Amino acid sequence: MNIREEDLVNNPTPRISVCLCVDTSSSMQGAPIHELNEGIKMFYDAVMQDEIALYSAEISVVTFGNGVECIQDFGSLERVKSVPQLMAHGYTPMGEAVNLALDLFEQRKKEYRAKGVDYYQPWLVLMTDGAPNGDANELDRSVNRTVSLVDGKKLTVFPIGIGAEADMAVLQRFSPTRVPLKLQGLKFKEFFKWLSQSVSRTSQSTPGEKVPLDVEGIGGWGEL
């Protein structure tokens, strides 16, 4: 039995899997990547300090910049030795990254089912400051897969644009039920604080139960 399966046997708490699918292309250099790293660290810290969320949440991080990479796969947060540090370089293969994120969700859900562990609807956080310039077919495939899952109530998507150059029209394609939001300035910390609180509330509910999002709290970091 591998470590990922051991986690599920030793801790059968229902899981909420969150994939941070984030743009780390060259245009994110400087303050944006610094603030993004700080926000992700705060997100990990907040979830780990919540007794229920610690055993329920699983976070993966997929970056798209210098190619596409899963730098943190799903698994017990207790095993996370250090929070991933992101570097900004390269272009914006968004479709390839979303397809990898969806593959990771599918693999983890198979493992949940195999071990009889219940799970909440997974969350995909998609953040970009530009427009995709990877393979157009991969982009179309990732959009179709995402929309199908959202329509089937098998995925929740949070599309977030960063800065003036973010392609909000592409983000909208990934989100049939929710208008994509634009981050106010570089308020990554405020966003991840809101996200950690949302994870905490969900982890205290029953899988399948509808947990209303803190829409009011979005005003602290996002704008239409």
Image (cartoon, helix red, strand yellow):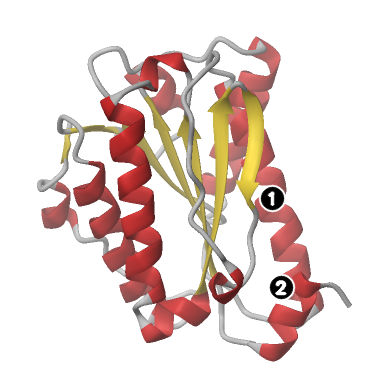
If the image is split into quadrants, where does the C terminus sit? Answer: top left
Q: Is residue 9 above or below residue 212?
A: below
Amino acid type of disc 1? Leu
Percent of width and height locating residue 79 = 61, 72
Q: Cα distance, mark 1 to mark 2? A: 12 Å
**Residue that numbered label 2 is attached to:** 112
Q: Is residue 208 above or below residue 164?
A: below
Residue 198 appears in which quarter of the rendering?
Answer: bottom left
Percent of width and height locating residue 163 = 24, 21
Left or right: where 197 falls relative to 33: left
Q: Is residue 205 visible?
A: no
Q: Is residue 146 above or below residue 144?
A: below
Amino acid type of disc 2? Tyr
Element assignment for label 2 = helix
Q: In terms of depth relative to the viewer, which is nearer, 83 or 139?
A: 83
Residue 125 appears in which quarter of the rendering?
Answer: top left
Left or right: where 25 falls relative to 8: left
Left or right: where 150 falls relative to 175: right
Do residues under tags 1 and 2 come within 8 Å of each other at their CB atoms? no
Element assignment for label 1 = helix
Residue 104's disc number: 1
- Residue name at image x 52 percent, y 70 percent: 120
